Amino acid sequence: MSDASSDTPKLTRRPEWTALADHRAGGQPHLRELFTADPGRAERYVVRVGDLHIDYSKHQVTDETLALLQELAVATDVFGQRDAMFRGERINTTENRAVLHTALRTPRDAVIEVDGENVVPAVHAVLDKMSGFADRVRSGEWTGHTGKRIKNIVNIGIGGSDLGPAMAFEALRPFTARDLTVRFVSNVDGADLHEALRDLDPAETLFIVASKTFTTIETITNATSARTWLLDALGDDKAVAKHFVALSTNAEKVTAFGIDVDNMFEFWDWVGGRYSFDSAIGLSLMIAIGPERFREMLDGFHTVDEHFRTAPAEENAPLLLGLLGIWYNNFFDAQSHAVLPYSHYLSKFTAYLQQLDMESNGKSVQKDGTPVEWQTGPVVWGTPGTNGQHAYYQLIHQGTKLIPADFIGFARPVDELSDELKAQHDLLMANFFAQTQALAFGKTEEEVRQEGVAEAQVAHRTFRGNHPTTTILAPELTPSVLGQLVALYEHKVFVQGAVWNIDSFDQWGVELGKVLAKRIEPALTEGADVPGLDPSTTALVAAYRSLKEV
Ligand code: F6P
């Protein structure tokens, strides 16, 4: 059997796929039984990468399952596709672009070519320029137009130009210069910019306009309003040069906006937006944590890149996590994947991963444009523990859905906490371990009865268990560890896209809404007729206009 357009067998007709389907149909023992039969899996199903200790023993898999998954990876040439990415081939075929975020974190002496040109020197030239600028802002050498020291940094961007730096700033708060106020504005809802600016002094505020394309309507609209706010206060167009810098691939548009290209930090079309916060897009973060810490973070990314590039399949963490996700997504019909960090500082981590994963793998055609006939990317969701425990964990434990989950925790709290607050860390982590234990092993009816629970309540108080989780433990949430975690997920997403035979690096699905919004806007502001608007939207627009006028 073959695709219409190639000799490659359809994924679901590959013998490696049907072998997995048969294996699944044969039924999997409960995790309780798996551990009873093979307690050694607790030691065996662990991979270590850099500072990450990754335990996948609480998955509904045996050695046989893992071997079958690995065969699928071989059949779909995941490693061949990986090598093409690292080599700088144009694997983003629908945009005809290389995919080289890994080049952003290579050492100075590395050689990575795109169209015969080594891109590494340019990467380091921008990093050096960012470092010089960050140092000048941090030391107070770079002042505002009136000579006042910059105390506030406002990053204006959306999607990958917001989520990455915003997440990383939050994650690394203890490493940030606490005398700087750093805020992130993304939403075109004017309330976002209003709240960010209302207590700031324009003379002390630096705007970082982050946009790969420099055409994104939300960002350009917010940046324009920010410029008005600044100029209303400072009354001199020349102030823009001291209060606005741009992070972009588009020098022409940056200049057209009125920002000097000297104040532009460049990156390249081979850096996808959702893979960009280790490029110039990370400038706000670099100012906050300092160039040295930023480079530690890049080294963390690089550690996992090298692991992904060179580790054998059985020990390759992104490969394993990607394949485990495929096991549930495609053979158990799991619709979602929860990421549950037990760290307050990772409060934006899952939101960041939503773009990384869902914009990458939310696709329904293969690379050649033919429809996929299998499930692709899961819905990614989650919030930090222990908050989630008191909200939606009920559904994970006792609901009807299978929700594979990643638990991310740290052995040490951050240094800055008082001794009393540090002591709370063991309680946090006791919850962390308790949850994965409860999810895996549950509580049987017999165990509930033995506790003397009334018969009418036994079913309600039973936990079936057998919920799969990965546990990711690291010593501490440092810049390097954050880089390692992000690279782990980047490559996991890559693996899944490679198996599903989709282009994980385009995002055409965001375009239609943008075009329609542009068309509808005049109807809202000027009451203009929108030709071809459907009856439902026409009625809603009319309702909006009459409500607006009240
Ligand atoms: O609309 C989606 C998207 O293109 C993302 O992929 C991207 O991260 C975001 O918009 C922002 O784009 P830009 O950095 O070009 O403003």
Image: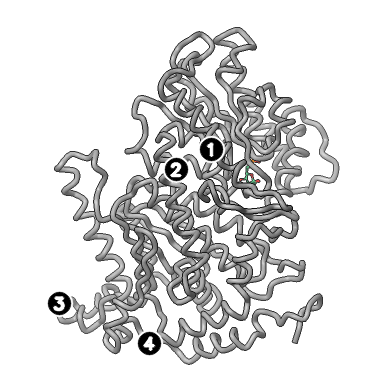
Q: Is the distance from the Cβ of mark 4 to the nearest ligand 1 atom less than 8 Å?
A: no
* Residue type beneath disc 1: Leu
The mark that comes first in sequence, 4 or 2, is 4
The mark that comes first in sequence, 2 or 1, is 1
Q: Determine whether, in the image, residue 549 is placed left or right of residue 275.
A: right
* Number of the label disc, if any, that sits on residue 81: none
* Residue type beneath disc 2: Arg
| 375, above or below 550, in the image | below
Q: Which residue is mark 4?
A: 29
Q: Which residue is mark 1?
A: 127
Q: Quick one: quadrant of the C terminus?
A: top right
Q: Can residue 188 be seen from the camera position used here? A: no
Q: Residues within 10 Å of mark 1 (few under 14, many from 20)?
A: many
| 547, above or below 203, in the image | below
Question: In this rendering, which labeled residue sits more in front, label 3 or label 2?
Answer: 2
Tag 3–tag 4 contact (CB < 8 Å): no
Q: Nearer the viewer, residue 387 or 267?
A: 267
Residue drawn at the location 56% of the way across and 36% of the way down: 186
Residue drawn at the location 32% of the way across and 80% of the way down: 41
